[in-house]
Image (cartoon, helix red, strand yellow):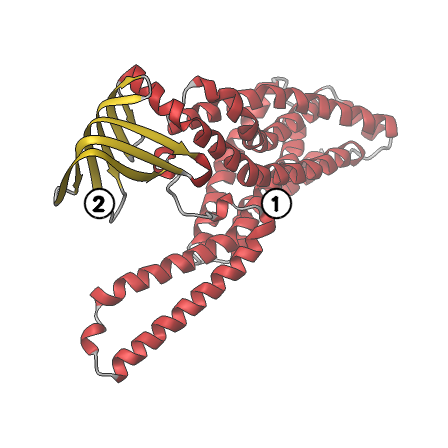
Amino acid sequence: MSAITRYVLLEFIRVFVVAIVVMTPILLFSLLGYELRNQGMGPAAFLRIMPYVLPSAMYICIPAATLFASVTVYGRLSRENELTAIKAMGISPMVVIWPTIFLSICLSFLTLWLNDLSVSWGRAGVYRVVLGSIEKTVFGMLKSRGQFDNGRVTIIADVEGNRLVQPHFVVNGGEGKPIVTFMAESAYFNCDPENEKLTLKLINGSWDRDGKIQLRFEDEFEWNLSLNDLTRKYHEQDKPSDLALSVISEEYVRQTAVTEIQKEKYAVDALLQMTSGSFHELNQVNWQPRMEELDKMEKRIYRLQTEPYRRWANGFSCFGFAVLGIPLAIWMRNSDMWASFGICFIPTLAVYVPLVLFGVDRAKNGSMHPSIVWIGNVVVLLIGVLLFRKALKH
């Protein structure tokens, strides 16, 4: 029995490795292309970003490779009647199934670790590369196109050495923030990646804010701009999905304490306004921003609660796909490997992904307990168990 088990396990590993080697580069290049295009960077940054994007590509590919290997190996065993021969020898087919199930659990932990690595180390690494090359990126795009535009900052200028000629800067501060426009005869800029700051030095030009405040200046005028604006990194600071699992619980405790303190402060303010007779201050105009602030804080708490469940559920999709793929392949006995994989993968994707998205959405808005994100895994496992009974019976 040990020889049979070893044979099936080696076959699974061989097919799994081949699948990973084929799938990962395809997804890796797609993710790299997205990052380079999104950050407005040139091909020179390709190799520097690659190590930081690799964990993201691998943790996405491993579940699909697990399903592919399960379908391929056990479909062939069933098609060539090797499972029937094992049963005829008085050996339970589970002898060749349990090792793969155990390996899929190990792969689930690996996927969980890669997921955590990609968000805690990978994204930070990509950002460091972006900051380190932002000056070359901006100058490169200005030289080739005459314009740099990332949706938040627009720069139009000619380039002479390290000097911008007749530059036109437009900085869109985002929702609720002003649009600032600069024009000058010439300009220089200096990047400070450590402090995430860009200093613009403009000579003989004008400054405009939402068309309401205008200022002309001669000689030199300095303006400090956050590098976040040039790298599109202007989302929520310490976003839960960017935190390592090891710090999420600590951040949850901190965010809960801050939210409770803010609620108590607003309750005291409301009480003081009522007791002092300042009822005119208890209106929607004054309190709407405070309610929105509290709402954002509570939503962040829900997201911090959800994130660990989401990552564990994503990781253990390997286990669920193996439990589903093995009996389905045995039952179908399809001679076409790719047809078998397609028949397994497409319905699995059609069921699993919508359920996961449903669970994550409900958990993040606080309408359901965070464990709801496991609904996709549970459904896949239940279907797999039912198929196991049917496949092994026949």
Give the class, few, some or many, for how many residues have Cα within 10 Å of label 1's Cα (few <14, many ≥20).
some
Q: Position of residue 107 (x, y in %)?
A: 67, 35
Question: Is label 1 in a helix, a strand or a loop?
Answer: helix
Q: Is residue 39 above or below residue 354?
A: above
Q: Position of residue 158 (x, y in %)?
A: 24, 19
Whichever of labels 2 and 1 marks the residue nearer the N terminus, that label is 2
Q: Position of residue 366 (x, y in %)?
A: 44, 58
Where does label 1 land, which residue?
Answer: 382
Tags 2 and 1 touching, CB below 8 Å: no
Query: Which residue occupies 57% across, 23% down?
Result: 24
Left or right placement of residue 252 versus residue 173 in this view: right
Q: Quadrant of residue 172?
A: top left
Question: Is label 2 in a helix, a strand or a loop?
Answer: loop
Task: Name the amino acid type tagged 1.
Answer: Leu
- Quarter the N terminus occupies: top right
The Cα–Cα distance between marks 2 and 1, rounded to whole angstroms, is 54 Å
Q: Position of residue 236 (x, y in %)?
A: 40, 47
Q: Nearer the viewer, residue 337 or 89?
A: 337
Residue 188 shows in the view: yes
Query: Which residue occupies 85% across, 33% down?
Result: 91
Q: Is residue 222 above or below residue 309?
A: above
Left or right placement of residue 222 versus residue 338 in this view: left
Query: Which residue occupies 86% across, 32% down?
Result: 90
Task: Name the amino acid type tagged 2.
Answer: Pro
Residue 393 shows in the view: no
Where does label 2 land, which residue?
Answer: 178
